[in-house]
Image (spheres, rainbow, N blue to C red):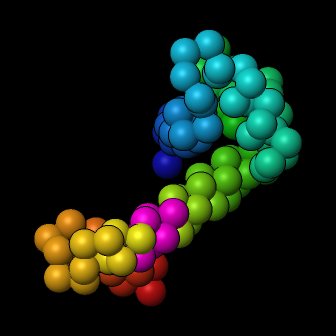
Amino acid sequence: MRNSAYVDQAAIWAKELTSRESRGPGDMENAWRRLEARYGISFGTFWALRYRKPHNIFIEIFAQLHSAYQAECERQMRKLAHEIEITKKITGASHAAVAASEAVVGKEHKRKK
């Protein structure tokens, strides 16, 4: 893969992490600070990947972003599984929303194996 492809992928992960962490307009820098505290990825890394992409990226930063992105995806899947359980209690296990949501969780579970 070209160096620019690694930078582009890192920028995508950084954007997704920022989007998931942000609480609304004007919260981007605060989101970056929360992500820095949670995952150890510097505020400056998020800033650079958004505003001034570097030509190269250190493998450590790339690996940190990948790891953080994976952790965030797993956190979202756990939240979805919890919401499915709540929905089952309210609507019953045979409801269409429950079946569709369980299909997503099952598909992701199979993909990981």
Q: Is residue 103 found left or right of 9 in the rendered image?
A: left
**Can you say whether 61 is above or below 105 in the image?**
above
Question: Measuring 41% from the left and 76% from the top, which residue is drawn there?
Answer: 85
Q: From the viewer's side, name the closer residue of 99 and 60.
A: 99
The spot of residue 34 in percent (x, y) is: 77, 36
Question: Measuring 58% from the left and 62% from the top, which residue is drawn there?
Answer: 75
Question: Measuring 41% from the left and 71% from the top, which residue is drawn there?
Answer: 86
Q: From the viewer's side, name the closer residue of 111 and 63.
A: 111
Q: Is residue 44 magenta?
A: no
**Can you say whether 56 is above or below 44 in the image?**
below
Q: From the viewer's side, name the closer residue of 39 and 55.
A: 39
Q: Is residue 100 found left or right of 69 in the rendered image?
A: left
**Can you say whether 23 is above or below 89 in the image?**
above
- The answer to whether one can see residue 5 in this image is yes
Q: Is residue 102 found left or right of 41 in the rendered image?
A: left
User: Which range of residues does the magenta coloring cover?
Assistant: 79-85
Magenta stretch, main secondary structure, is helix
Q: Is residue 100 found left or right of 89 in the rendered image?
A: left
The spot of residue 18 in percent (x, y) is: 59, 33
The spot of residue 106 in percent (x, y) is: 33, 80
The spot of residue 30 in percent (x, y) is: 74, 24
Which of the 4 image quarters holds residue 71? bottom right
